[in-house]
Image (tube, rainbow, N blue to C red):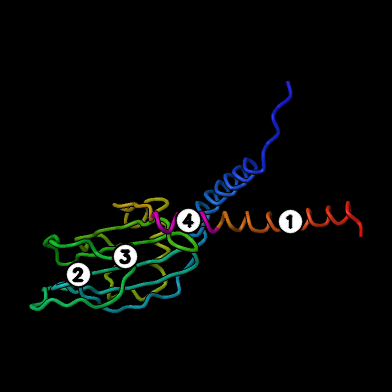
């Protein structure tokens, strides 16, 4: 019994499915490989942000495929609410109330390229843990490396307490990598098809 020929629509669906599968694998590689490859950061920049009556010291560093954000709560709270300082959604502090701790620190590592696809967060309420360091002192190029090590092996300050997929970034990255596969292949097919038509229909 002869098999039915595959229609052009079916072939297109197959190509898209294969491209998305490749995009998914490429996104996973672009998420985890930077954590294995990082050797040092670029040196964190330090500033302050305010969310309502709560102020935060904020240190930020980034390298290819990795972004580090370190927040430390400023005590005491303000008497008048203020909202200033820009943060990406993945690095925003959780809403209050906050634990009664003198050194509340929230370190967040986002991994993925071109957009972050994974968020890992450490929350520390005691100076007995050395990672993450207080944000106002986090001006070196090592915290992003320590965060990657901790995320992969649980060293330094232990593994992250929270791990969350950043779905918007994940979907975007999969589509981008899939398009990188589909685009050149489709162009090559058109070129080959055009050359074939010219060869079979000489002027």
| Mark 4: few/some/many CA within 10 Å (<14, 14-19, 20+) | many
Q: Position of residue 135 (x, y in %)?
A: 28, 72
Quadrant of residue 180 within the rendered picture: bottom right
- Distance from Cα at disc 2 to Cα at disc 1: 58 Å
Q: Is residue 4 above or below residue 70?
A: above
Number of marks in picture: 4
Q: Are marks 2 and 4 in contact (CB under 8 Å)?
A: no
Residue 159: tell me if it is visible.
no
Q: Are marks 1 and 4 in contact (CB under 8 Å)?
A: no
Q: Residue at x 45, y 63 (%)?
A: 115
Q: Is residue 60 above or below residue 152?
A: below
Q: Secondary structure at mark 2?
A: strand
Identify residue for label 1.
190
The disc placed on residue 91 is 3
Q: Residue furthest right?
A: 203
Quadrant containing the C terminus is bottom right
Q: Is residue 171 magenta?
A: yes
Q: Residue at x 29, y 58 (%)?
A: 122
Q: Earlier in the sequence, mark 2 or mark 1?
A: 2
Q: Position of residue 163 (x, y in %)?
A: 34, 52
Q: Earlier in the sequence, mark 1 or mark 4?
A: 4
Identify residue for label 4.
31
Identify residue for label 2.
73
């Amino acid at each position: 019994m002869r098999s039915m020929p595959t229609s052009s629509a079916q072939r297109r669906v197959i190509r898209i499915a294969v491209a998305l599968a490749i995009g998914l694998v490429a996104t996973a590689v672009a998420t985890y490989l930077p954590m294995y490859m990082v050797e040092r950061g670029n040196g964190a920049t330090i500033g302050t942000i305010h969310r309502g009556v709560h102020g935060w010291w904020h240190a930020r560093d980034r390298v290819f495929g990795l972004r580090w954000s370190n927040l430390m709560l400023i005590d005491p709270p303000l008497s008048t609410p203020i909202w200033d300082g820009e943060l990406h959604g993945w690095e925003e502090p959780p809403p209050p109330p906050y634990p009664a701790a003198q050194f509340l620190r929230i370190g967040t590592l986002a991994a993925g390229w071109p957009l972050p696809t994974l968020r890992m967060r450490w929350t520390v309420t005691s100076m007995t843990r050395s990672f993450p360091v207080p944000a106002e002192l986090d001006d070196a190029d090592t915290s992003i490396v320590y965060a990657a090590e901790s995320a992969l092996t649980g060293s330094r300050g232990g593994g992250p307490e929270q791990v969350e997929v950043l779905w918007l970034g994940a979907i975007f990255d999969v589509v981008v990598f899939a398009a990188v596969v589909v685009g050149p292949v489709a162009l090559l097919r058109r070129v080959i098809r055009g050359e074939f038509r010219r060869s079979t229909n000489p002027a």
